[in-house]
Amino acid sequence: MPELITKLKEYRAKHDMKQGELAEKVGVRRETIIRLERGQYNPSLKLAMDIAKVFGVTVEELFSFPEE
């Protein structure tokens, strides 16, 4: 399975938001956000959409898989 590429940390920094704050906004634990940022966890479609909504961007702007 290809590794997930995420810009989550970059968008959090732009919005001056801590991992715990984002986790609270989307209803997950901080550890989930940590794993997402490291590419160790593939979010559900709902979670990806909820996170994108927080930042006002599309899911594709936040998450992608490398081209083969």
Image: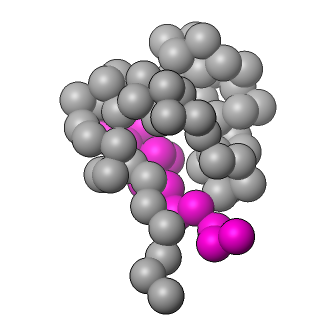
Does residue 13 appear in the picture of this structure? no
Position of residue 11 relative to residue 31, above or below, is: below
Q: Nearer the viewer, residue 49 or 55?
A: 49
Tell me which corner region of the image, top left, top right, bottom left or bottom right, holds residue 57.
Answer: top left
Residue 64: where, in percent of width, then height?
44, 61
Q: Which residues are magenta?
A: 1-18
Q: So how many labels did they put on this image?
A: 0
Residue 5: where, in percent of width, then height?
52, 63
Residue at the image point whose x is 71% and y is 33% from the top: 32
Position of residue 44 relative to residue 6, above or below, is: above
Is 46 within the magenta? Answer: no
Residue at the image point whose x is 69% and y is 41% from the top: 34
Residue 26: where, in percent of width, then height?
52, 16
Residue at the image point whose x is 64% and y is 47% from the top: 42
Position of residue 20 relative to residue 56, above or below, is: above
Residue 11: where, in percent of width, then height?
37, 43
In the picture, measured across the screen, residue 60 lies left or right of residue 23, that is left
Does residue 58 appear in the picture of this structure? yes
Tell me which corner region of the image, top left, top right, bottom left or bottom right, holds residue 33.
Answer: top right
Colouring chosen for the image of the structure: one colour
Q: Nearer the viewer, residue 34 or 42?
A: 42
In the picture, measured across the screen, residue 19 lies left or right of residue 57, that is right
Tell me which corner region of the image, top left, top right, bottom left or bottom right, holds residue 1.
Answer: bottom right
Q: In the displayed orientation, state which residue is furthest to the bottom.
A: 68
Q: Nearer the viewer, residue 37 or 66?
A: 66
Residue at the image point whose x is 32% and y is 52% from the top: 60
Is 5 within the magenta? Answer: yes
